[in-house]
Image (tube, rainbow, N blue to C red):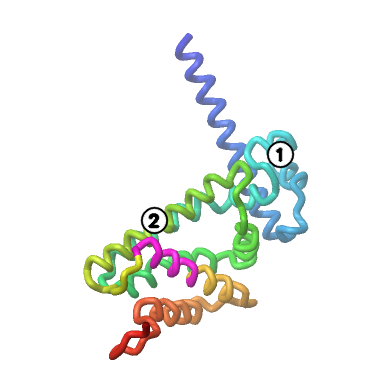
């Protein structure tokens, strides 16, 4: 009897995983073919060959479906970015190695990425929202760890906490990413060069070296 239950449970989980993958693939294909705004949830369900109600067990709405595609990939990029940053010694080089992974990720699918950046604003409700917010927290935690290590190594001055500095760095990255991705054909090399200039300002500051401003 126990063996029967295990087999049944295994089949159920496998069927669930297969449906989820079909939904992901259908949503991605339609968002690319028709655009996010012109794609309907019903079209995604039909392409995925699942019932309309079944689709809503995985996502609350179309925005949820967009992040159903991206969240797992973004979490993988956070891990990759952390590994790349740890190969560098200077803090600026660490930051560039870290963010280069995200720029490369978004450059592979610029049209779809623009919708992701647009829709993530105030994205706090939906079946996938908690998972996406978790990926965002992961990213910030890794930045805080890099910043704290740079402070301990004497690469950063000032009295602000690592958390505050990391948030400032993340804000700069977010702004630069949006501006870069807004171009018709985002140039990866140019985008990273501009990001480097902006990040250098965080490290060097605006004050003259010889005097402090009260």
Whether pointer 1 and pointer 2 mark residues with C-beta atoms closer than 8 Å, the reply is: no
* 182 relative to 167 in the view: left or right: right
Residue 145 in the image, given as x and y percentages of width and height: 32, 59
Mark toward the start of the polypeptide (1 vs 2): 1
Magenta stretch contains residue 171: yes
x 46%, y 66%: residue: 170
Magenta stretch contains residue 81: no
Q: Quadrant of the C terminus?
A: bottom left
What is the crowding at mark 2: few (fewer than 14 residues within 10 Å), some, or many (at least 20)?
A: some
x 54%, y 45%: residue: 130
* 192 relative to 161 in the view: left or right: right
Q: Label 1, on which residue? A: 49
Query: Most prominent secondary structure in the magenta stretch?
Result: helix
Q: Determine the secondary structure under disc 1.
A: loop
Total of numbered circles in the picture?
2
Q: Is residue 29 above or below residue 7?
A: below
x 37%, y 81%: residue: 205
x 48%, y 9%: residue: 1
Residue 141 is labelled as 2
In this view, which residue lies farthest toward the left?
153
Q: Determine the secondary structure under disc 2.
A: helix
Q: Which residues are magenta?
A: 161-172
* 86 relative to 71 in the view: left or right: left
What is the crowding at mark 1: few (fewer than 14 residues within 10 Å), some, or many (at least 20)?
A: some
Rendered image quadrant of residue 2:
top left
Residue 148 in the image, given as x and y percentages of width and height: 30, 63
Rendered image quadrant of residue 202:
bottom left
């Amino acid at each position: 009897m126990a063996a029967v239950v295990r087999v049944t449970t295994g089949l159920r989980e496998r069927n669930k995983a297969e449906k989820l993958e079909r939904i992901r693939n259908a949503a991605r294909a339609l968002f690319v073919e028709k655009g996010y705004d012109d794609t309907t949830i019903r079209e995604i369900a039909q392409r995925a060959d699942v019932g309309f109600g079944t689709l809503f067990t995985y996502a609350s709405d179309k925005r949820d479906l967009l992040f159903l595609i991206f969240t797992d990939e973004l979490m993988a990029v956070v891990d990759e970015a952390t590994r790349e940053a740890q190969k560098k010694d200077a803090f600026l080089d660490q930051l560039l190695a870290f963010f280069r992974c995200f720029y490369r990720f978004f450059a592979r699918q610029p049209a779809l990425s623009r919708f992701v950046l647009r829709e993530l604003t105030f994205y706090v409700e939906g079946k996938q929202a908690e998972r996406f917010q978790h990926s965002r927290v992961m990213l910030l935690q890794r930045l805080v760890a890099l910043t704290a290590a740079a402070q301990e190594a004497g690469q950063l001055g000032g009295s602000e906490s690592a958390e505050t500095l990391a948030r400032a760095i993340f804000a700069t990255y977010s702004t630069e990413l949006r501006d870069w991705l807004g171009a018709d054909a985002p140039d990866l090399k140019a985008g990273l060069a501009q990001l480097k200039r902006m990040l250098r300002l965080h490290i060097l500051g605006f004050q003259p070296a010889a005097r402090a401003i009260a």
